[in-house]
Image (spheres, grey):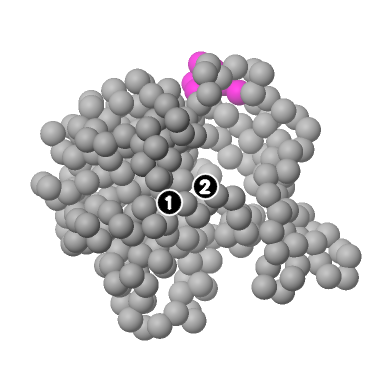
Amino acid sequence: MDNRYASTAQWYDADNRAVFQADIPFYIARAQQLGGQVLELACGTGRITIPLAEAGISVTELDYSPQMLEVLQEKLQPKPDLAKQHIRIAQGNMTSFSLSESFSLIFIPFRSFQLLETDEQALQCLHAVVSHLADNGQFILNVFRPYGEISDAWIQREEQLDFESYLPTREKVTRHSIKKACDTDRRLLYTDFIYRLHKQDGAVEAFHDSLRLRYFYGDELRALIQQAGLTIIEEYGWYDGSPVEAGHEFIFVCQKQ
């Protein structure tokens, strides 16, 4: 797993799409319902971490990318000490982490599980989750839901605008994507991202990164979850509780078997 947002972590939070915001109250509500310790895998820049801590929830954060964790640390600096005290940060791989406690809630948000490219990696991650999940705890997994069978028709080699937003400095950030390749045998999507910073003096600075994301069909993912020793107890297609068939996402809430 070598996807690290090495060049673009500083612009990651510029994303203003609904999918980037709607999950935050969902995870806060579930953490408050369950109580106890929370573990977020692939925490990134702390997009969900910081709101959890500000809600008084103790959360352990793990991410593979030092660049993303550096942004998280920078965002924490101006926060009150009380919020900071609720956060513990670790750099590591979600396929092989080992912590000395169990958690009432473990979650992998915003499709980060799709960075795991093989069944072996996915199962390693899920087994690690099971070994850290409290007996009555819950594990929540989110990946995007494919619309029908993915094929080479997915490929778009022209830049497509994903979003544009403004920084507090009033400088504009845009992100374009290029869907450059699709491996239907390995279920991998290859995407280039181009973030552009539009400065007030008219200059434009570009930052590039590439990702490989594995896509899952519903039955395939359900089988992996079952194989790892987990049972799905709730399924949603969006964070408002919409059913899977009516939503853009797979959101699976699981417990140990």
Displayed quadrant of residue 200: bottom right
- Magenta region, residue range: 182-187
Q: Is residue 226 left or right of residue 88?
A: left
Q: Is residue 49 left or right of residue 256?
A: right
Q: Is residue 66 left or right of residue 232?
A: right
Residue 57 in sight here: yes
Displayed quadrant of residue 249: top left
Q: CA distance from mark 2 to mark 1?
A: 7 Å
- Residue 228, label in figure: none
CB of mark 2 within 8 Å of CB of mark 1? yes
108 and 2: which is toward the camera:
108
As shown in the figure, which amino acid type bears the numbered disc 2? Val
Position in image of residue 127 (x %, y %) = 24, 38
- In the rendered image of this protein, does residue 11 appear above or below residue 79? above
26 and 201: which is toward the camera:
26
Residue 118 in sight here: no
Q: Residue at x 50, y 26 (%)?
A: 146
Mark 2: few/some/many CA within 10 Å (<14, 14-19, 20+): some
As shown in the figure, which amino acid type bears the numbered disc 1? Asp
Query: Is 226 included in the stretch rendered in magenta?
Result: no
Query: What residue is pinned by disc 1?
Result: 23
Query: What residue is pinned by disc 2?
Result: 19
